[in-house]
Image (cartoon, helix red, strand yellow):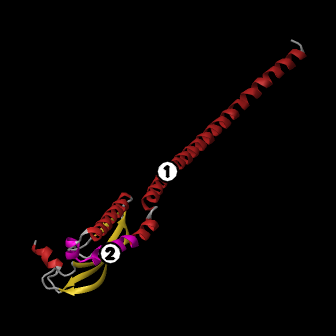
């Protein structure tokens, strides 16, 4: 064996030793890299799930807003049409009942035409979600009715609507216009009546 052979063997041994030592360093770096990638994956998965939940909530909210817009889009127009409906009702009420029954010719045709117009207008409003509220005989509800006066009447349960001055209207679940009503007072209390039943 020559000195060169010994040097060559030493050199051959050094790279093997050098390769062996760094081999554990890449394994540690790989393990750290895998852990970092796992953490990043979990973070991205969490962000994805949150984004999907936000998108679903946005879709639901948008659907609800679109449905509300469809239901309540005609609100201002319907409110304006209520004046026409009120005027038609006043025109019909201004003709005495006996005059309606004995009406002939042009007067009868006029009254019939006004009644037909009122029915058609109310049907059209109902087709668009606007309904008349006629609370006669019902318990006073401040959400749907506006009390104009009280009527002393011991025969009727206190708080009952005894007279409707002007009909109310609702659109969907919202009050378009409250009914203007007269409310009974002085009669038996509603709570006492419900306790007996």
The picture quadrant where one finds residue 183 is bottom left
Label ID, residue 59: 1
Using residue 35 as the reference point, say whether residue 83 is left or right of it. left
Residue 6 in percent (x, y) is at 85, 17
Using residue 9 as the reference point, say whether residue 131 is left or right of it. left
Q: Distance between the residues labelled 1 and 2?
A: 49 Å
Q: Is residue 78 magenta?
A: no
**Quarter containing the N terminus:** top right
Q: Is residue 18 above or below residue 172?
A: above
Residue drawn at x 36%, y 74% is 87
Q: Name the residue under label 2.
A: 91
**Quarter containing the C terminus:** bottom left
- Which stretch did the figure color magenta? 83-102
Mark yes or no: residue 83 visible.
yes
Of residues 89 and 26, which is closer to you in this image?
Answer: 89
Residue 169 in percent (x, y) is at 34, 69
Residue drawn at x 20%, y 72% is 102
Q: In this view, does 195 lie above or below 149?
A: above
């Amino acid at each position: 064996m020559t000195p060169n052979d010994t040097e060559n063997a030493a050199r051959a041994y050094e790279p093997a030793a050098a390769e062996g030592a760094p081999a554990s360093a890449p394994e540690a770096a790989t393990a750290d890299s895998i852990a970092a990638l796992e953490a990043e994956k979990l973070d991205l998965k969490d962000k994805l799930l949150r984004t999907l939940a936000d998108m679903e909530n946005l879709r639901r909210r948008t659907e609800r807003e679109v449905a509300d817009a469809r239901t309540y889009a005609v609100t201002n127009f319907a409110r304006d049409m209520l004046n026409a409906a009120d005027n038609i009702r006043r025109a019909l009420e201004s003709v005495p009942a006996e005059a309606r029954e004995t009406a002939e010719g042009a007067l009868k045709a006029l009254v019939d035409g006004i009644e037909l117009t009122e029915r058609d207008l109310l049907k059209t409003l109902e087709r668009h979600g606007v309904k008349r509220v006629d609370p006669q005989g019902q318990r006073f509800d401040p959400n749907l009715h506006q009390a104009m006066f009280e009527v002393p009447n011991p025969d009727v349960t206190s708080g009952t609507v005894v007279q409707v001055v002007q009909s109310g209207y609702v659109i969907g679940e919202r009050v378009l216009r409250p009914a203007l009503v007269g409310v009974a007072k002085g009669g038996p209390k509603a709570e006492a009546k419900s306790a007996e039943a």
